[in-house]
Every structure is written in structure tokens, then in C-alpha cells.
Image (cartoon, rainbow, N blue to C red):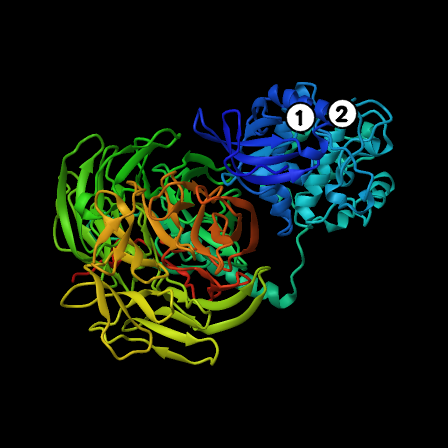
Amino acid sequence: MALTPGTRIGSYEIAAQIGVGGMGEVYRATDTKLGRQVAIKVLPDAVASDADRLARFDREARTLAVLNHPNIAAVHGLEDADGFKAIVMELVEGPTLADRITRGPIPVDEVLAIATQMAEALEAAHEQGIVHRDLKPANVKVRPDGAVKVLDFGLAKAMELTGAMSASPSMSPTITTPAMTQAGLILGTAAYMSPEQARGVAVDRRADIWALGCVLYEMLTGQQAFGGELISDVMASVLKAEPDYGRLPPHNPRRLRALVVRCLEKDPKRRWRDVGDVRVELEQIRDAPTDTLTDEPQRLRRGERAIWAAAVLMALAAIWLVSTRVGSTPDEGGRGYDEPLAFQFSPPEGASFYPHVWRIPFALSPDGQWLAYAATVDGGPSRLWIREMSSLAAQAITGTEGAVEPFWSPDSRWVGFTASDVLYRVRIPGGTPQLIARTVARFPAWSPGGEILFTNVQRGLSRVPVEGGSTSPVTTANSEFIHRWPQFVDESRFLYAAGSGPTRIYAASIGSNLRQLVMEIPAVGSTIAHVPGYLLYVQDGVLWAQPIDDVSLAVDGARRRIARGIPIGGGGAAPFSVSPAGVLAYWTQSLIQRAQLQWMERDGTVLTRVGQPAVYDGFDLSPDDTLVAAAQVEELGNDIWVYDLESGGAFSAAFNTETRGDTVPVWTRDGAELTFLAPGVAEGSALKRAGANSSADPVTLVASGSNKLAGSWNAAGDQLVFEDFTFDNGVDLVVFHADDGRIEPLPWNTRSDEIAGRLSPDDQWVAYVTNQSGQNEVWVAAYPSGQPRRQVSPAGGTHPDWSGDGTELFFISADRWLVSVALREGDGSSFVTGPLTKLFQMPGPIDIVAGSHNMFKAASDGQRFLVAAKVEATDVPPLNIVVNWRALLEGE
């Protein structure tokens, strides 16, 4: 029997089912005593009375309990309560290795990192006398930080004779008895079992080495080493056939190929004898110079050789100039700096810069020798790449999926980054990412004293040690809205920008409440950067260098112009990075990306497109699915366009506002009017409501609403849930009462952000997003009381939306999948959900955090979705690189 959310097993409260298999059902649960998330494996009803399976279930718990290793999922306890027998295990986030392989072969550097950690886990188990016997990609988890966790030690699933021959060979069950390694027994999954397992003879730790070889082959090729339509075909292949080693990529290390071949020797006497030896070999392959590893390179045609020769000569000339000029200073005669060297850089073929709206996706190292940047390949998730300025090659860093905001250690030996607003660091050039803090962190900076300073969810600055640990507040934003872009001057003193419009730059110190005003920028707050003697910022498209005294931190002379045409993106993000060694990188094109509205089915099939590619600032689908209102960013300001999906026509709904700039349209429940945020002139920004195609002036609902975004109306049209920024609590959800103009806060608001309020079709519930846990999660609360309420997304979520009949809730997961949550009938006192289903991966990055800017809208029948798909970034510009940028300085 599947457990429903809210069920208690001892001190553990079930949240959602996250997996099911022959030996158990796995659930996410909350440890109510310790306040942590765990995984609980419970025997299904069909086998609860099977003495053999019960014995193996107990054995798995005891086996796992003795294994204490960072690459093995830990066991917290064994529960036997209310008729349920359950193992309480560490909850491991992230996809399985099988999920990763479905996307195709894995890059060799990532393969080596994953395989080394798998070998370390097996080595620890073998030292305890434990053989896994069922190693396969589905039993390996790869966490977002790159850490590998091997699951299901001691688990051997029993084969169901009925229908067994139709089972998937890659997930086939195994034949077993209570004994573990005796002759005459078959243990393991068919596609990964060793020949001795397939024959039913005695096995030892070398069976795990065979399975590791199978997994290595599959990671490198994207194909199973031993295949077949039926389980019997697979077993015959294991016993008689050899893998097609010709599938291994020719550019892979020769030693890695030899390692795989030796792992897959059918005679166990010719196989690696100890997985520790395999681990050492993997480490040596990983650490060896790349030019000694690869097979003979692919040959280039004559024309290609000529092109590459010319490109290499040009690049080598640039490299020589960079290496000789980085860090140059004026000569003793005061003749000034050398002439600047300027060139452009683009990611490798097939990759493109990740153009995040709110963050700067590239950063130069302090010594000017490295460039770190976020890039995406073929529309996939962003990853962190690094390029040494004296090299022609760029390198993707394994385990950095989702990276958007790189930043460097002062010694240029580590690069930090954020992914889903979580802080990581990785040693260059080839380290494994390490978690710093699982907290919402934006605009981070690394201090010489070994701390990270960042903007927290309350919009002040916080700090955390680079080795990880608890965070602590440093500044409080209060009425200044936000503190950001911290820049260290020395171990304790730093500069930061305060405010969202005209910006003040302050100097402060760690451990002190005092601060000093340095200067004011009379424009939208731009990214700032400090190098000795200068503070850099962007105003009106110009990159300025303001001389400052690094001792007094006071302005020291007139500002100097460096470059023109620098755009400012969302939140004041100006795309430039500067190194104290004299290197500058910048873009001269907006980071904001165009999107195409398109209809998609539940399986991800694209049906039709709506309108033309544009930069959208919010869109909404009318309740009857016939009209789309979309705020498009245009040259003279935002304009809301309404598309008629039945006729194919479109018209501009300018609403007679005094200044164009209307944004975030939301339909009333009857489809007659639109609510939107209008800039206004005399009264300031305001939430307004007007007919979509009416000459009548719009009605002002809430004035002074520059940070007020409409969420959803109730069915009666007399209550509007919207986002309201307050200096004490961040963004809160509040209700506007149309009958008397009251604004009433919802009772569950916290000092964290609550956004994207979406009322259910029956107005009984409101779905919303909060970052109270340290990452964005989707919750549902009773409306308007707030009780009961519960978390719906298991591991990150944004942009909730209901189906028209209220039987499903949709949201976007942290890994960019559109997820469906089936809803079940309840008694009204609780919110009851069924399983979560991944529908399709969103076709483009999720750049906008605030859920009122829809990234998708579900049609009323829940079978189609209007999606904002990123237009492939053919127009993302190359980076401009300038060596000795001080030579560009000119007066105003």
C-alpha cells in the first residue's frame, strides 16, 4: 500500500513517494525530532509476508549500517511501527547516473570523477567484506555538488517468474536465495552481472569490478556493454560476446580504454583483483598530462589545416602579448602604460555563454591569467568553464551544472560559483566542487581573510567561511532595499552598493556596524568592481573608472571613461569583470534574451508558436484559452500585446497610460480585464485594471506599486493576491479587497520571500513559492487562513500553476523540469497529493526568480502548456578582452 503524505512511521512524517522497486518503496520524509529530510524504504504489501524478502530487508539495513563512507548512502536507523518495516536512510538529492546517461555519452573528465568516487565506495565496502552484487547506473546518484553516492548495498531483488521475460534487461530483477555468494545462485542485474554470476558459481569482489567496467563503458559510449531484447539474450551476451570497444570515443585516454577492457575480462583471474588498484589507475589517468593520454588525433582535411594554422598563429600572438603585458605598470620615466591589447573570446564550438538576466556569468581571476564563465551546450544546463589566458583550450568543470555566477579566490587558485542560489567552490584546473553553504546567496565575493560575503534573502549582506559553516549577517538593508556587489579592499574592509535606483557606494568593515559613504551614482545601481586605485561602475552605457584613495577610501579625482555601450540588465547587472593585474572583460550587448511563446504537449512535443520572438516581461493565458496577454520589452518601453489564438490576430493594449512600460499582465477570472503594473507619471507606479481592448482609462487599484506584482484574482473578482515588498519582511503575499480597497497580508509571511501566489480554481488553496528553507520551494496553504499548509516540491521549485479543474498542480523543478502533482480528494482539512510526474524539461534557462513572471501557463484541460522557450542565443556576443585597460582611460 502506497503511503500518503502525512502518514507517520515512528518519528518520521511521509512527504512524497520518490521511488519504487521490487524490494521496496522509497519515500521522502521529515525526521520530526531532528528536523532533517530523510529517505525511507518500506516493503510493499505484496512482499511484506515473504520471509525470504524480510530476511534480506533486515540484512540490507545491517549491511549498510557498518558502512561509513562519504560515497555510500548512510543508514540512520531501522523502524518497525504500525505494521510497516522501514529503513531510514540518508536522502540523496540529484539524478541517478542512469538519468544522466540517457542524455548521451559523458565527457571523459566527468567519467573519471564519477568512476573514481564509485571505486572509493566499493573499496570501503570490500574492506568490510561486503560485495555489492548489484552495481548499475540506477544505483548511483550524482548530487548537484558532484558528489557520488552508491545506493542499495546488500540488496538482491527476487525475480518474478510471471512476465519476467518481458522485463527491461537494464533493470531486470535477479534470482537469489538467503545465501549471498554460494555456488548455484544467480545474483545481480542481467545487464551488469559478471559471467560467474550468470553461471551461478561462487562470486567475490571481482564481480563488482566487472560491474564497474560495465558502468564505465556505458558512461563513455551512452550504450550498454551487453545488450539484448530479452534477459536471456543479455545473459548469453555476458557469457559469450565481447563489448564493441570500437564505440569508445577515439580521443579518450588509452589507459582508460585498457582499464575498461581489463575490468571486463570474462575470466576473473585476468580481471583486476582489487578495486583499490582500479581506483589508483583512475586517479593517475585523471592527473596525467592530457597530451600523453589520447589516441592519435583525428585527421584534418587540407583546407581545415590551413584555417586552423592561421587561427593558431593569431591566437599564439595574442597569447604572447597577454603573457608579457598582464600586470604591466608605468615605467620609471612616467611615460604611462603600454598600448592596450584588445581581442574577443567566444566559447568552444557548440557552446554559448549563459546570458543570465540578473547575474554576471563570467569573471577574470585576480592575477589575470584565467577566465571563468558559465556556458551551455546545445541548450542544456549551464556549466562552469575555465580558460587559461595563455592557452587555446577551454575546460568544462565536472559537477558544476547550474552554475551562473563565478567569482575567484584572492590567490586565483579557486573559483567559486552559485547554482540555484547555493554556494560552491572548486580548485582549478581539475578539482571536484565543494559545497560552501546551502543558503540563498547572490553577488558573492571572496575575502583575503577566507570568508565569502554575499547578499542574503533579507537583501542585506551575510558572510560564511570558505570551508563551510554557519552564515551570519553583516549589514541590514532596511529602507535601502538591497545591498549588493561587495568588493574587498583588504582582509576586513569592503565596498558595497546600496539601493535599487540611484545608488550609494559605502565602505564598511567585517565586525563593525560603522560605514562610510564613498560616492553616489545617480542611476540604476550598476555592478561595481574595485582594483587598486579605482572603483569601476556603469552609468548610461559607459564604463567609468573613479579614482579613490585605497587608504581613506575617499574619492580622489575626476572619473575617467573606459568603454561605451555597456548594457545594464536586470537588477543593475552590468556585464564586465576586471582584474587588478590589468585585464578587463566586458560585453556590449544586453544579456536579456528573447523568447518564443509556443504550445507544448505533456510529452514535450512542440505544437504551434504564438507571436514572434521577443523579450517578454510576463505573460498570461486567458481562462478560456483563447487570448494571450504578453508584456514585450520594446525600444520605447514595455507594451502589452494581446494575441487572439482563434483568429491569429494581435493588438496592442496600451491602456492610455501616460508612459509606456506596462508589465506582468494577469487576467481576471472571467477573462474580461487585465491587471498590470503601470509606471505612471503623476501618481508613480501602480497596479491597474482595464479591459483588454477598451478605450476607457484603466482603474488604479494600488498606487506606488513599483515592487507590487499581481498574482491571481479569485472567482468573484473582488480579491487579488499580489506580491508586496516591505523592508522588514522582504517580499510578502498580500490580498487587495476590491470592495473597500483594503490590503491585508496573508498570515504565513516570513522574513524570507513569499512570491507567486496562485489561487486554486475553487479558491480554497493558494500555491506559492518561498525561500525560507534556503532555496525556492513550492508550498500550498489553505486560503485565506494559511492552515493547513505543506511543502509540495521535494527539492526546489518555482512558478506554480493549477489545471483548470483543480486536479493537478504544476511547477518547475530546480533541474528545469515541468512537474505535475496529482491531487487527491480530501476532507478539506488537509492538502492531499499523489505522485510527482516529470513531464518535460523546460526549453531554456529559468532566469526570472519571481514567479509572477510566468515561464509557462497550463491550458484549462491540463494537456497543453504555453511556454516561453529561449530563442537560441545566436546573438550572444563574444567577450571583449582588453589587456592594460588603464591605457584606455580618458577624461569625461
Relative to 667, is 384 above or below? above
Q: How many marks?
A: 2
Asked whether, in this view, residue 389 is left or right of residue 205, the answer is: left
Percent of width and height locating residue 591:
37, 61
Per the model, the C-alpha gap separating discs 1 and 2 is 33 Å
Please indicate, yes or no, whether residue 479 appears anywhere in the rendered image: yes
Percent of width and height locating residue 412:
38, 39
Q: Residue at x 16, y 33 (%)?
A: 513
Instruction: Give the number of the disc on residue 52.
Output: 2
Q: Classify mark 1: helix, strand or loop.
A: helix
Bin the neighbour count of mark 2 within 10 Å (Cα to Cα): few under 14, some 14-19, many 20 and up. some
Identify residue type, mark 2: Asp
* Quarter containing the N terminus: top right
Residue that mark 1 sits on: 276
Asked whether, in this view, residue 473 is left or right of residue 266, the answer is: left
Q: Residue at x 44, y 25 (%)?
A: 34
Q: Classify mark 2: helix, strand or loop.
A: helix
